[in-house]
Amino acid sequence: SAANTAAADPNAPAASAAVVPGKAKKNYSIQFIQGVAGDEFYITMQCGVEAEAAKLGVSVKTQGPQKFDPTLQKPILDSVVAAKPDAILIAPTDVTAMQTPLQAAAAAGIKVILVDTTTKDPSYAASAIASDNVGGGKAAFDAIKKLNPDGGKVMVMSTDPGVSTVDQRIQGFEESAKADSKFQYLPVQYSHNDPATASNLISSALQKDPDIIGVFAANLFAAEGTATGVRQAGKTSTVKIVGFDAGPNQIKALQEGTVQALIAQQPGSIGQYGIDEAVAALDGGQIQPKIQTGFTTITKENLGGEGGQAAYKSN
Ligand code: T6T
């Protein structure tokens, strides 16, 4: 299965997810709700969603909140549920706040497929598809260790507590860092998915601890802001940054040397499998309740090969 492949070799491409029907039995209406609009990770996922929907002959619409924020995502979900689509693909923005609204959507007879993030108790969902985020956090630590084998102070720049994906990445990174006596793990900073906030937070952190040797930036916007802050502090040569995600700005930062490694997810595949599972659930076919997709560690060295192919689309 995809899960086994990812566990055995994080660099292996995710195996094909589902028993994929050639065509859906009906032209179902499916709604995709992103974690946030305008994020290249979810834009790439949308491409996967739309391509698979066209292949299987179902209709899909996409929308997302202006910020990665449950108070903005919940009203979108509520209006989508009121329109009664056959299925909803959603990346919930908070493990707690989105739990009850999603349970209500499933109780209304709509098939719910979780893509990327999850909630506390996802038992209402027909299927959940996500990266190996704990594994990705561990891979981020391995990348920092490779760049700085002598160890030192490391910290994580996250978005918000309660976002399942980034919390799992932190968990993986923290476990690895604490297991290695050469490294000192500093408290996580929360930048609210805002690059300017991440930039300010890393500037202050570097004033307090000028000997930080590595930062794991747990998503695209955290990485963007961290790179800016480290560059403005003139610390690019001593502070190694490993970012999660591979949007166009992250690839540029890697090329310019302001970021040293990226953990690239497979958002297109997550979207594709999301549609497969929605159609399987609606057709009464064979569902895979849990699918784990892989990731690739990209550095300047492998950017032209497999790494380059892992980059996200910007539109
Ligand atoms: O890292 C992705 C996604 O996996 C995460 O849940 C939220 O942030 C991103 O969308 C990147 O901005």
Image: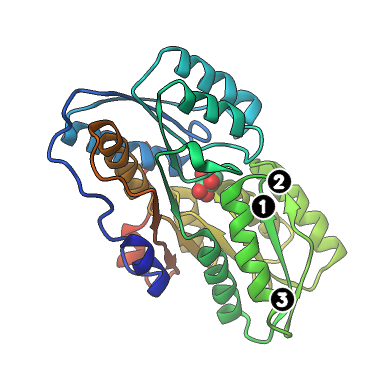
Camera-nearest residue between 308 and 244: 244
Is 272 displayed left or right of 116 in the figure?
A: left
Camera-nearest residue between 194 and 141: 141
Q: Which residue is drawn at 34% across and 68% down?
A: 5
Q: Tell which circle, 2 or 3, labels the residue nearer the N-terminal end.
A: 3
Alpha-carbon span between mark 1 and mark 3: 18 Å
On the image, the x and y values in percent for residue 304 come to 32, 66
Residue labelled with disc 1: 158
Q: Is mark 1 on a helix, strand or loop?
A: strand
Camera-nearest residue between 226 and 216: 216
- Specify the label residue 199 is tagged with: none
At label 3, counting other C-alpha atoms closer than 10 Å, the crowd grade (few under 14, some 14-19, many 20 or more) is: few
Say which of marks 2 and 3 sits in front.
3
Amino acid on which disc 1 is placed? Ser
On the image, the x and y values in percent for residue 253 come to 51, 57
Alpha-carbon span between mark 2 and mark 1: 6 Å
On the image, the x and y values in percent for residue 260 come to 54, 68
Q: Residue furthest left?
A: 22
* Quadrant (top left, top right, bottom left, bottom right) of the C terminus: top left
Q: Is residue 85 above or below residue 12?
A: above
Q: Tell which circle, 1 or 3, labels the residue nearer the N-terminal end.
A: 1
Alpha-carbon span between mark 2 and mark 3: 23 Å
Residue labelled with disc 2: 191
Amino acid on which disc 2 is placed? Ser
At label 1, counting other C-alpha atoms closer than 10 Å, the crowd grade (few under 14, some 14-19, many 20 or more) is: many
Is 274 displayed left or right of 26 in the figure?
A: right
Amino acid on which disc 3 is placed? Lys
Q: Mark 2–mark 1 contact, CB under 8 Å?
A: yes
- Specify the label residue 178 is tagged with: 3
